[in-house]
Image (cartoon, rainbow, N blue to C red):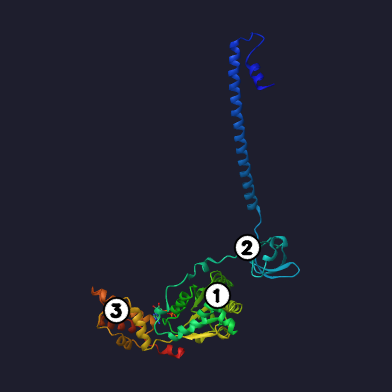
Amino acid sequence: MSLREHAMTDSTDFRKKPISPDDYVTLAERTILLEQRVRELELEREQIAAERTRLENEVRILQAELNKLRQPPLVSATVIDVLDDGRVIVKSSTGPQFVVNYPESIIGSKLESGAKVALNQRTLAVVDILPISIDPFVQAMNVEESPDVTYGDIGGLEDQIAEIRETVELPLLHPELFEKVGIEPPKGVLLCGPPGTGKTLLARAVAHETQATFIRVIGSELVQKFIGEGARIVREIFYMARKRSPSIVFIDELDAVASRRLDIATSGDREVQRTLMQLLSMLDGFDPRGDVRIIAATNRPDILDSALTRPGRFDRIIEFPYPDKEARVAILKIHMRNMNIHSDVDVSMLAAKTTGASGADLKAICTEAGMFAIRELRDIVDREDFNKAISKVLGSIGDRSDATDIYG
Ligand code: ATP
């Protein structure tokens, strides 16, 4: 029965009453109304169908979430070796090593030693390759895109500048020179000298001149509480250095991890030794012509392990002595550059009075002299301010004769 017929039979009793012309008008109106109603219902049906599809999708997503939550945890591990027979040796995070299978189709050639993987808990088969993560501790390490110190900010270290330029700057900027001559540049450069003699300053300056990222690590930061943590941090630092290359890794206070190894050692010492071994192996596996350079600094070269200073590791040693008179003049001039100095101040006289002072002491003297002037509400620093600053700064230094024994 058509809709029109239905509309007619639904409300009109034909047998009781003959159809008048007026009835035709009513029927036509009713037909229009019903057709309109049909259109409305069709629209409603479409809306309900769309809502149903949306809800079905939501159910599917929630189901997937639920399945994820029901899955057993995976074991994280590191690949030690990939065997020819389609299996791998992995070291699980709990300690032991296993020989396990992996699905060739999923992982293929991306599996290599050192990769982080996830293992199935029951079969220990590799099910996924995990992204390499950098420890937040390493991420937060002192990284400078390109420090703002230049060679012009360093006084009296001409020989040291020349040496660091040829061992760090040349391999970074002109590696082809070493290739042509057929030699390898030194892998690591060790800066030795008393505190405050400009070792960090020079390392930052060379990073600036080469536009390299400067990653500063303090040796004592590598000494960690848990076994294997220090070694892992060393690995991650080198990974980060490669990722942000060209870069310069500067390890300050190297003696904290690299002091001579002894036969009688506590478990704490052994952990420090493990960190040192990792550092040595990173240095060994390092491309000397690559764009990551390593500089280390120490105040105690006498206690360093000899394995570190053998050729092929930190094989270039640059000494930083206390500045002589000429160098002190140069350093004072650098730190007085932006100061408002009275004409009665004689720099060479100041240099003569500051025998035994380091670069950092000379900087402190300039700052103190400025403070004396400010204290007396003057905006110009005179000779008397410098005299007071010298006795204040150098008076607290004490005897430095012991330092001379180490540095010669
Ligand atoms: P530490 O062994 O304690 O780490 P360091 O040798 O690395 O000391 P720096 O941090 O380089 O010492 O020096 C400290 C400050 O002393 C520098 O920021 C700089 O202002 C000043 N200074 C040291 N040597 C010089 C120098 N030769 N020329 C100019 N300023 C210097």
Q: Which residue is mark 2?
A: 130
Q: Quadrant of ligand 1?
A: bottom left
**Quarter of the figure with the N terminus:** top right
Which three-letter amino acid code belongs to the residue tagged 1? Asp
Q: Residues within 10 Å of mark 1 (few under 14, many from 20)?
A: some
Q: Which residue is mark 1?
A: 291
For numbered disc 1, what is the local secondary structure? Answer: loop
Q: Say which residue appears at 63% left-offset and 14% top-offset.
A: 12
Q: Earlier in the sequence, mark 3 or mark 2?
A: 2
Which three-letter amino acid code belongs to the residue tagged 2? Leu
For numbered disc 3, what is the local secondary structure? Answer: helix
Using the numbered discs, state the Cα–Cα distance from disc 3 to disc 2 in whole angstroms: 57 Å
Q: Which of these two is toward me, 28 or 296?
A: 28
Q: Which of these two is toward me, 256 or 101?
A: 101
Is there a contact, CB below 8 Å, between mark 3 and mark 2? no
Is there a contact, CB below 8 Å, between mark 1 and mark 3? no
For numbered disc 2, what is the local secondary structure? Answer: loop
Which three-letter amino acid code belongs to the residue tagged 3? Ala
Picture coordinates of residue 364, whole percent (x, y):
35, 79
Q: Which residue is mark 3?
A: 369
Q: Residues within 10 Å of mark 3 (few under 14, many from 20)?
A: many
Q: From the viewer's perspective, is residue 75 above or below residue 24? A: below
Q: Is mark 3 within 8 Å of ligand 1?
A: no
Q: Is residue 344 left or right of residue 131?
A: left
Q: From the viewer's perspective, is residue 70 above or below residue 392? A: above
Q: From the viewer's perspective, is residue 330 above or below residue 218? A: below
